[in-house]
Amino acid sequence: MAHFDEKAKPFSNQWMNDRLAVDTVKKVLSTEYWIPKNINFLWAMGMILAATFGLLIVSGIFLVMYYQPDTKTAFDSVNYTIMTEVGYGWLWRHIHGVAASVVFLIIYIHMFTGIYYGSYKKGREMIWLTGMLLFVLFSAEAFSGYMLPWGQMSYWAGMVITNLFGGFTKDFLGGIGNIQALVEWIRGDYVPGQAFLSRFFMLHVFLLPLVIMGVIVLHFAALRIPHVNNQDGEEVDFEKSARLYKEGNKKESEVIPFNPVFLSKDIFVMGIYFVLFFYLVFYHFEFAMDPVNFDPADGLKTPAHIYPEWYFLWSYEILRPFPFNVGLVAFGFAQVAFFLLPFLDRSPNVAPANRRGLFGIWFWLMLIDMIVLTIMGKLPPEGVWNVIGFVAALTFIILFILLPFITKTEKKA
């Protein structure tokens, strides 16, 4: 039977401890959550992502008060009602639009930091897998949100992306059955219309945010057990170092508590980030809003060049240069390749890429290749751009195929 202190006053520290174990929660999540000393500002990206997601939730709540998920009024509710008639509606839309774009920049920085320092290895596989699952969920959230203004690029991007499912069905079922049935089921009609918009509205404002919050909790839980990696890849005896820290021997201890020591550093980095973020919100918000999407959706007028938002361009460019069937396979490979990274990297070493020989070259080639793919994805697929896009897409696939062979030859440090 649980023990309760009958003398404890309601809502006092003891009263709360008896019922919610507040002090234990504080220790587990805060004051005795130990972080290695030898890490840099890049380790603050996780907190920045959480803060940006919070901004997206808050700004989204204000926007959904006035948004109308109807094909006849959605465009006007965004571009006229919210932008001109609602007090500070323009500000909330700018915050939401900029945050939706910047969050992917932070995700990519966070992801490549993990790759560079080998933070997906030796017991940290679940951290990486839950992080990549969050990347997929954020991508789905961004795509569903992109549909809601019901502009030209929203409509046609929805048309193109949902058509891919028909291609996958045809290729992987060998042409068996009605290949268009899946596409029509997703859209709720032959072409994107009211059912399509209503479904993506529900996904964007309700289902996906709930799932994302659940996976964020899982991601932090996965991080709590094996602890945070460090920039030297060193094995840290967390129990010994924590004991030294609590005994007052902070100099010899290799760790610091998350709160207040590391959290103060996180807050400093977040302060710099939010200065830059709100600079974009007030002065350069247009980078997050495609000008073509300021035209109402028209199913009878195809844009000259259909392309997704910048954070999807690299995977879009992997699809585009190949014949359709081959392109679908390449696109599918690109979606799962990063998930497989902990199992493709066969090296026993956990160390920065610059200390891992061929892997260091692989890392920089991969980063440069993804930048090239992103640039090519925005350009029309013609002439020399098509050739560069094809070479970059092929390079991406080859790099992942070579990774197990490159890392298997790496000697244990």
Image (tube, grey):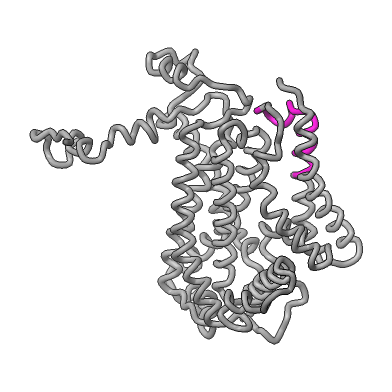
Q: Nearer the viewer, residue 218 or 383?
A: 218
Question: Where does residue 26 sit, x and y in percent of width and height?
Answer: 33, 34
Q: Is residue 240 above or below residue 356?
A: above
Q: Nearer the viewer, residue 167 or 67?
A: 167
Q: Nearer the viewer, residue 8 or 406?
A: 406
- Was residue 115 drawn as part of the magenta stretch in this picture? no
Rendered residue at 50%/51% (across/down): 52
- Was residue 363 drawn as part of the magenta stretch in this picture? yes
Q: Is residue 135 above or below residue 181?
A: above
Quarter in which the C terminus is drawn: top right
Q: Give the main secondary structure of the magenta stretch.
A: helix
Quarter in which the N terminus is drawn: top left
Q: Based on the displayed image, in which of its 4 quarters is residue 393 positioned?
A: bottom right
Rendered residue at 39%/28% (across/down): 32
Q: Nearer the viewer, residue 108 or 321?
A: 321
Q: Is residue 173 left or right of residue 186?
A: right
Question: Where does residue 253 sit, x and y in percent of width and height?
Answer: 48, 16
Rendered residue at 48%/54% (across/down): 212
Question: Where does residue 50 sit, x and y in percent of width and height?
Answer: 48, 48
Q: Is residue 222 above or below residue 293?
A: above
- Quick check: can you spot residue 292? no
- Quick check: can you spot residue 356? yes
Rendered residue at 80%/68% (across/down): 324
* Magenta part of the chain: 350-366
